[in-house]
Image (cartoon, grey):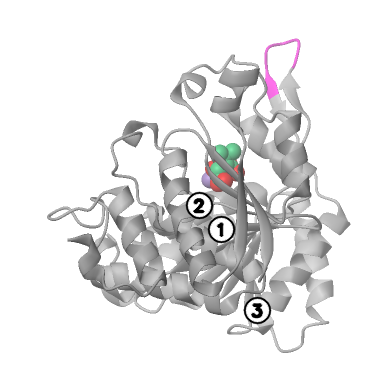
Amino acid sequence: VLRKRIVVLSGDGIGPEVCSEAVRVLKAVAERFGHEFIFDHQLMGACAIDATGDPLPAKTLAACRQADAVLLGAIGDPKYDNDPTAKVRPEQGLLRLRKSLGLYANIRPVTAYDRLLEHSPLKKERIQGADMLIFRELTGGVYFGEKGRNPDGSAYDNCTYSREEIVRIAHRAFQAAENRRRKLTLVDKANVLETSRLWREVVQEIASQYDSVEVDYLFVDNAAMQIILNPKQFDVILTENMFGDIISDEASVIAGSLGLLPSASVGDEVALFEPIHGSYPQAKGKGIANPIATILSAAMLLEHFGLQEEADSVKAAVNNALDKRVLTPELNATAPYTTEQVGSFIAYGVLDIADCQLH
Ligand code: IPM
Ligand code: MN
């Protein structure tokens, strides 16, 4: 048996609801495959500010460092969004966590599910078969540069990248491309930004070490259009922190719901797994949040542990939920299921229990 410690940071808004379902599914995996997963719940985000005054308490960070993996729900609260003068913010917890754990590569797969093509506002023939993997740099750029206010009242955010910060994620992206359709697109703004010109320079150098991978370069404005116009042209996309944040939300339109997209954040230490969506405060406690993005993040966590068969069993159970339309209201308006029903259905699927259990 495999014994693993997983820290769960449920966070705010719908975070606790979607995390409960992912934990339910991981427990089903442990039961079916004979593993032992130990779940350690810790505070991060607005809930941590409420309890301790700090969005990332030292105890949480210490627990994450000692864990084999971290599962995160979502963080954020409108009371901070609507108060630009707040000094302490939930997002600071997430950013500090990413930085402290050295999670420099955020990997976001985007797939058009055949069963859900109708749910995308994009034309079916454009998105059918789309399958891309976004590598978003996560611990540099404008998110982490010096920021502040000048005496004259103006504000600034500095964007800096070192060669090494680009090199390490570029290698990961090229390696992923080698194992996929062997195409890598660097998304930047090299016609305007000096950091983008450094990205191009470094990626061009590294490209020579990956002969089998075809590389192209797109400016981010054009990329934003191409993702909607012709998403099938993309295999691996490599980009800096903020561009990756923006284009991955955009790309989620291809999948049909932001509630489907998982991510893995990896670096040199422990890895972290989280849905790409936010805390969706309007839906909190209503049982309408889609748990699939978090459940698929848990599947990526299993892959990270080297448990491919286990991960595949989760993905198969998710596909079955899509086939049977056991889905939350944004994907099934006529006969919606609750967050918990979707999670239970997928957990039963992992355990190979007939889906009649639900009815
Ligand atoms: C994400 C989120 C975060 C980000 C926020 C909550 C700080 O939007 O993970 O994509 O911008 O990185
Ligand atoms: Mn985002």
Please rate how many residues cluster around mark 1, counting C-alpha atoms within 10 Å: few if below 14, some from 14 to 19, many from 20: many
Q: Which residues are magenta?
A: 150-155
Instruction: State if disc 2 and disc 1 touch (CB < 8 Å).
Output: yes
117 versus 196 height, above or below: below
Q: From the top left corner, tell me how far across and down residue 212 is, in percent.
A: 71, 89
Label 1 near ligand 1 (CB < 8 Å): yes
**Residue drawn at the location 61% of the way across and 71% of the way down:** 303
Quarter of the image for residue 84 reads top right
Q: Residue at x 66, y 32 (%)?
A: 93
Callout 2 amino acid = Pro
Q: CA distance from mark 2 to mark 3?
A: 22 Å
The disc labelled 3 sits on which kind of residue? Ala
Q: Count residues near mark 2 (Cα–Cα under 10 Å), then give few for <14, some for 14-19, many for 20+.
A: many
Q: Nearer the viewer, residue 308 or 215?
A: 308
Q: Secondary structure at mark 1?
A: loop
Q: Residue tagged by mark 1?
A: 263
The residue most toward the left is 334
Q: Which image quarter: residue 123?
A: bottom left
Q: Position of residue 22 (x, y in %)?
A: 47, 54
For image coordinates 81% across by 49% down, the residue present is: 161
Question: Which is the main secondary structure of the residues drawn in magenta?
Answer: loop
Which circle marks residue 180 in the picture? Answer: none
Ligand 1's image quarter is top right
Which residue is tagged 2? 275
Q: Determine whether, in the image, residue 91 is placed left or right of residue 12.
A: right
Q: Is residue 193 left or right of residue 75?
A: right
Of badges 3 and 1, the one in the foreground is 1
Examine the rendered structure and indicate whether residue 154 appears above or below residue 330.
Answer: above
The residue positioned farthest toward the bottom in the image shown? 212
Q: Which residue is mark 3?
A: 177
